[in-house]
Image (cartoon, helix red, strand yellow):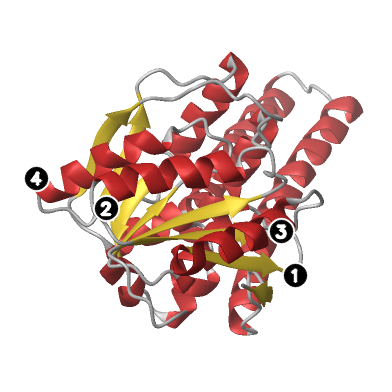
Amino acid sequence: MTDYKPYLSVVIPVFNGSATLEALFLRTKTVLDGKNISFEVVFVDDGSTDDSWPLIQKLKSGHGKEVTGIRLARNAGQQAATFCGLLEASGEWIITMDDDLQTPPEEISKLLDAAGDREATLIYGVFAAPQHSRLHDFGARIFRRLLRKVALDFPDGSSFRLLHSSLIKRLPTELRLLNHIDPVLSWAGSGILRVEVNHEKRLYGKSGYTFLRLLSLALEILLLYSTLPLRFIIWLGFFFAAVSFGMGIYFLTLKLTVGAQLGFSALIVAITFFSGMILMSLGILGAYISNLYTIGIGRPPFVIQNKT
């Protein structure tokens, strides 16, 4: 962090975004200069393999205190890179947004206006007409539905958000190791608002959030922030115990009444099925233990290699 204390910090995680960074910064600067707001843009280079870091350094040399560049030692993922930017931001208010220009920087004004009109510490930009593929949108809906199991107040939001810096200061140290942003912010914040914003088609590259990636991320959040999978195991155990008891009574009745013989194939199928359920349950328990271990040893979700 620097001695410069702007009113607004704009946190942008960057991964191979050299094609859009300069335009993104200049358009953001135009918007905020027009509103007479002091600001900094915090670029977090998440292990890019293109010219993103040299371009961030160039922007820093040309615009001084309005640009902060952070380079991570390895690719840690968008969530970790954004969280790093939030911890390093100096502004009273913080905006997070992607580096792909699908969310126009001009939409920043809508979030700032909403913060001025109402008492809210967390405001999400919601895309009125998302410019994603149908499969991506389907995955996003599943992701949000699962996320509401751990963050009941979470709206149909996006990575385009405005939050007050007090939210970050409220986070206990151990929560900062859990780098999934939205569940943590929903626990710390109150008065969450949503504002409709425009969303444009991607001009460069493609989204890293495929359907399977979104589904995997949703399941990861459930295992990290919720006890729902554990409760699922309990009810699954009760269900199969009841089914097994009923099947036992049924076959015992057949044996005593008509002398029917139990089939070997049915026995093998039952053993295989229940073995699969046991292994799945052990996998869920193992995931919880793994998360506790990671938190216990204090393993950081990201490592900063360099700063401008």
Q: CA distance from mark 4 to mark 1?
A: 40 Å
Q: Say which residue appears at 38% left-offset and 72% top-offset.
A: 90
Image quarter hosting the C terminus: bottom right
**Residue annotated with mark 2:** 122
Q: Is residue 175 above or below residue 286?
A: below
Disc 2 crowd, CA 10 A, few/some/many (<14, 14-19, 20+)? many
Is residue 303 in view from this perspective?
no
Of the two numbered discs 4 and 1 on the same chain, state the one appearing first in sequence: 1
Of circles 1 and 3, which is in front?
Answer: 3
**Residue annotated with mark 1:** 73
Question: Given contact means CB atoms under 8 Å apart, are the residues at marks 4 and 1 in contact?
Answer: no
Of circles 1 and 2, which is in front?
Answer: 1
Of the two numbered discs 2 and 4 on the same chain, state the one appearing first in sequence: 4
Q: Say which residue appears at 66% left-offset and 63% top-offset.
A: 57
Q: Say which residue appears at 43% left-offset and 69% top-offset.
A: 89
Of circles 2 and 4, which is in front?
Answer: 4
Q: Position of residue 294 (x, y in %)?
A: 65, 75
Q: Quadrant of residue 183?
A: bottom left
Name the residue nearer the viewer: 30 or 96.
Answer: 30
Of the two numbered discs 1 and 2 on the same chain, state the one appearing first in sequence: 1
Label 3 sits on a secondary structure element that is helix
**Residue annotated with mark 4:** 117
Q: How many marks?
A: 4
Q: Left or right: where does residue 236 sit relative to residue 260?
A: left
Q: Amino acid at mark 2?
A: Leu
Name the residue nearer the viewer: 22 or 49.
Answer: 22
Of the two numbered discs 2 and 3 on the same chain, state the one appearing first in sequence: 3
Q: Position of residue 250 (x, y in %)?
A: 63, 27
**Residue annotated with mark 3:** 53
